[in-house]
Image (cartoon, grey):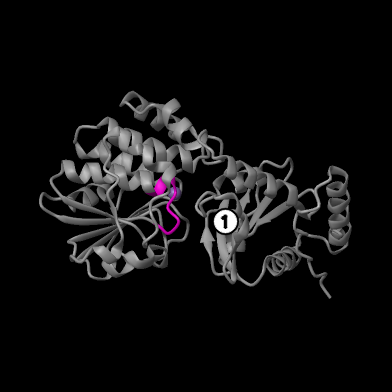
Amino acid sequence: MSREQTIQTVLGLFGPGTKVALAGHINPDGDSIGSMLALAELLKARGCQVVKLLPNDQAVPAVYGFMGEYGLALDFVPPAQYHEDPDLFIALDLSQSYRLDQAGAVFARSKKSLVIDHHPNPDDFSDYMLHDETAAAVGLLVWELIGSSGEKTTLAMASACYLALLTDTGRFSFQNTNAQVLAAAAEMTAAGADPASISQAVYDTRSLGSLKLDARLVERMEYLVPDKVVYSWVYEDDFAELGVALDDTESLINLLRSVAGAELAILLREDGIQVRVNLRARGSYNASKLASDHGGGGHQAAAGFNFAGTIPEAATAIRHYLESEGILAADSRPNFKDSQHAQAVSSDRDGHNERPVPPALSQPG
Ligand SMILES: [Mn+2]
């Protein structure tokens, strides 16, 4: 089926009176939220009844609250509070059904299902699929649907799609930023999206605690592979002590990936008895393979997985994996004892001894 046929097939599902439930992925990001908001506007213009579901009972990250100023209803509903059987369920920005979390129960009782996504190697779990892994954001696919629908493009739609595009391209800085992305951003701006206001609301509204969390992360940074792979970690207690929401981790991984020469940046976030591993790659390294080999997923440049164990165990396991891949030569292992010592010395010099000692990384036998 050609792209245009797929678009028309999808639009054909949006008939007047159709009861539609939209849902994005766990740990909602700007693309997932922006795509849902924009698509909800298109569906309402088409006369559909729309509900926007959260994946679970966690609220939408507060940082996206400003979208309400553009006339967008931020009335997201936890799945436990939605008891109807939708005619159509639309999953956005996910390629595996488990990422729907509790919204999966609504998916299961919907009459038809559609996935709109851009992750590589998607699972085939829906009746319909609009999938393009070359699209920088799902918001770009929704923008295409809006453009092909014949409905009026509103400022609200343009702003929501712009949010999706801005965040999934790292403010138009990641490798997925291309002429198509910038042309679409120009169209959205022409339709009323305000780049300065949206950018400021998403990125320049950091809390003091959030910036101090950055500082802890930077202080703990280490090379897992000298000059190539950089990593750091955050504890659950860091969030509690600094009053930072657990969803506020985007800046952490971006700090890590900004290290010169780092082909792979790894953020380890303590999460109960497991560790959430967040990966960012540049160059030819495929973070998606590392993640999927550990039961996770993602893109080549951005991927993640959950590790059952502690932060040092996760770091050791990843180092062994990188060794087995050949990215880390056996004789180039960093000496963790020395680097910890160096960190302790510099802490003493600064007169700060309260910093928790970084976890000891067991040397491979
Ligand atoms: Mn996305």
Question: What is the three-letter code of the residue carrying label 1?
Answer: Ala
* Residue drawn at (22%, 47%) of the image: 8
The residue that label 1 is drawn on is 240
Whether 166 is drawn above or below 106: the answer is above
Q: Is residue 52 left or right of residue 263?
A: left
Q: Is residue 106 left or right of residue 243?
A: left
Q: Is residue 125 visible?
A: no
Question: What is the magenta segment's predominant secondary structure?
Answer: loop
292 in magenta: no
Q: Which residue is more in the foreground, 124 or 82? A: 82
Residue 194 lies in quadrant: top left
26 in magenta: yes
* Residue drawn at (26%, 43%) of the image: 73
* Residue drawn at (19%, 36%) of the image: 151
- Place of residue 134 in the rendered image (x, y in percent of width and height, measured from the top left): 46, 46
Number of marks in picture: 1
Whether 170 is drawn above or below 306: the answer is above
State whether label 1 is within 8 Å of ligand 1: no
**Magenta stretch?**
25-32
- Place of residue 278 in the rendered image (x, y in percent of width and height, measured from the top left): 59, 56
Identity of the residue furthest to the left in this view: 17
